[in-house]
Amino acid sequence: MTGSILTLLTIFVLSVFVGFEVISKVPSILHTPLMSGTNAVHGVVLVGAIIVLGTGHGALELTLGFIAVILATVNVVGGFVVTDRMLEMFKGREPKRAPAPETTSAPAPAVEQEGVGTPS
């Protein structure tokens, strides 16, 4: 039992180091598409969380399964939001339109000034 836990912990730690090294080598221009695609693929994680929630029997299993479904859903939705924002950056900008001319038919009233050419 202890040997299998130690083996799994070793694999986990090594995968963290390998993942960090791989992601740190990705250029920043490719980081957003890579991460949004990865988050979209996490729909598989959501399906797994739903299966775990469906097979849970105790209160702890059901609680952890529910939390897993919530977190997986947030991750998938976040991936699609990032993808949508990224695609918005590639759309062309609309040209600026000229301001609409004013359509007033009556001229503005003249303002009389005191003391300038008017008898008091």
Image (spheres, rainbow, N blue to C red):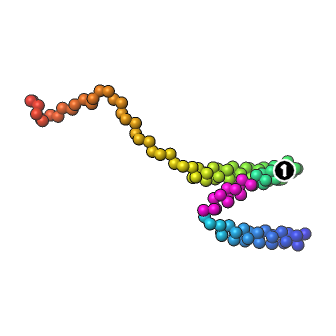
- Most common secondary structure along the magenta stretch: helix
Q: Tell me the crowding category of disc 1: few under 14, some 14 to 19, or many 20 or more residues within 10 angstroms, Cα based.
A: few
Q: Which residue is at a point 37% across and 35% down the rendered structure image? A: 101
Identify which amino acid the numbered label 1 is placed on: Ile
In the displayed structure image, the side of residue 89 where residue 58 appears, left or right: right
Residue 73 counted in the magenta span: no
Up-down: is 98 above or below 32?
above
The residue that mark 1 highlights is 51
The boundaries of the magenta stretch are 29-41
Place of residue 71 in the rendered image (x, y in percent of width and height, measured from the top left): 73, 53
84 or 91, nearer to the observer: 91
Q: Is residue 39 magenta?
A: yes
- In percent of width and height, residue 26 lies at 65, 67
Q: Is residue 81 left or right of residue 2?
A: left
Indicate the secondary structure of the residue bearing disc 1: helix
Q: Left or right: 118 with respect to 8? A: left
